[in-house]
Image (cartoon, grey):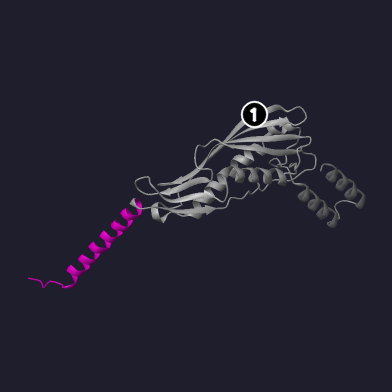
Amino acid sequence: MKPTNPLVPNVARLVRVCALSLIVILIGGALTGCASYKVPLTYEPPTNLVPRSDTASVSVGAVNDARGTRADWLGAIRGGFGNPLKKLYTEQETALVVKALVEEGLRVRGMLSEGAVGGHRLDLTMEKFDTSNLVNGEAHAYIAISVVDLATQAVVFTKSYRTDRTDGGIGAGVFGSVNELAALANRTMNASIDSMLDDPELYAAVGGRSTLVPPGEKSTADRLKELDELLSAGLITEAEYQESRAAILKDL
């Protein structure tokens, strides 16, 4: 009969104790209160955005929060029972945050009008904007807009823009990342804003021109750089260079 290793029972007992302790921690976290976090949201424009000077003048009016939640609610990382473990809130009322994001989107496109004289006004309804993480992270950003002609006060365009995104790398329960879930919500809202502000139908309504560089088309900076290289290589004359440069700048 083999002698019994006295360490085996102790190791097995330690494993059971650790497993029970982990279960108690997880269940305790699921049944007790949750932590709250204020998270910032920022606007990041598309990489192929080139501001142009001939776009329309647009201001942002009222932003109606139709979500039926707390005014600064953003979402939550949830436990195994679906209960919130980490709640996310915007730094101020979410409607004000979204208004600032849209204004920044207009500004980088050269379209933002600070005043209310002339041009058009965007009135927005935030139909849905939230984020959640139970197994995978998910976020939703639904915005409906009405474009008002300030000269006539007539609504000239209405449309809804919706973006849904998921992310499996956030982690679940007590291990979920607040920063990653907030970033997912931020990207989702930015996507809806870009869909809105780069919509050809919106540009037609406000009398502007798209500020996105179409696929295959070079930006002004790229065209000028290419022209400089042609001149430096002696492939074009100075006169041809000046003529082509003037033509490029005329498109601005």
Q: Position of residue 151 (x, y in %)?
A: 78, 30
Q: Looking at the image, is 42 positioned above or below residue 149?
A: below
Q: Is residue 220 visible?
A: yes
Asked if the stretch drawn in magenta spans residue 143, the answer is no
Q: Residue furthest right?
A: 239
Q: Nearer the viewer, residue 215 or 51?
A: 51
Q: Looking at the image, is 150 positioned above or below residue 112?
A: above
Q: Is residue 167 visible?
A: no
- Give me the residue at 58% from left, 49% from top: 92
Helix, strand or loop under label 1 = strand
Q: Position of residue 144 (x, y in %)?
A: 60, 33
Main SS category, magenta section? helix
- What is the crowding at mark 1: few (fewer than 14 residues within 10 Å), some, or many (at least 20)? some
Q: Looking at the image, is 207 positioned above or below residue 24?
A: above
Q: Nearer the viewer, residue 147 or 137?
A: 147
- Give me the residue at 43% from left, 53% from top: 171
Q: Quadrant of the N terminus?
A: bottom left
Find the magenta span and give its range. Answer: 1-30
* Residue that badge 1 annotates: 158
Q: Quadrant of residue 115?
A: top right
Q: Quadrant of the C terminus?
A: top right
- Give me the residue at 32% from left, 55% from top: 28
Q: Position of residue 80 (x, y in %)?
A: 35, 48
- Give me the residue at 75% from left, 31% from top: 150
78 on left or right of 111: left
Asked if the stretch drawn in magenta spans residue 6, the answer is yes
Q: Name the amino acid, label 1.
A: Thr
Q: Position of residue 13 (x, y in %)?
A: 20, 65
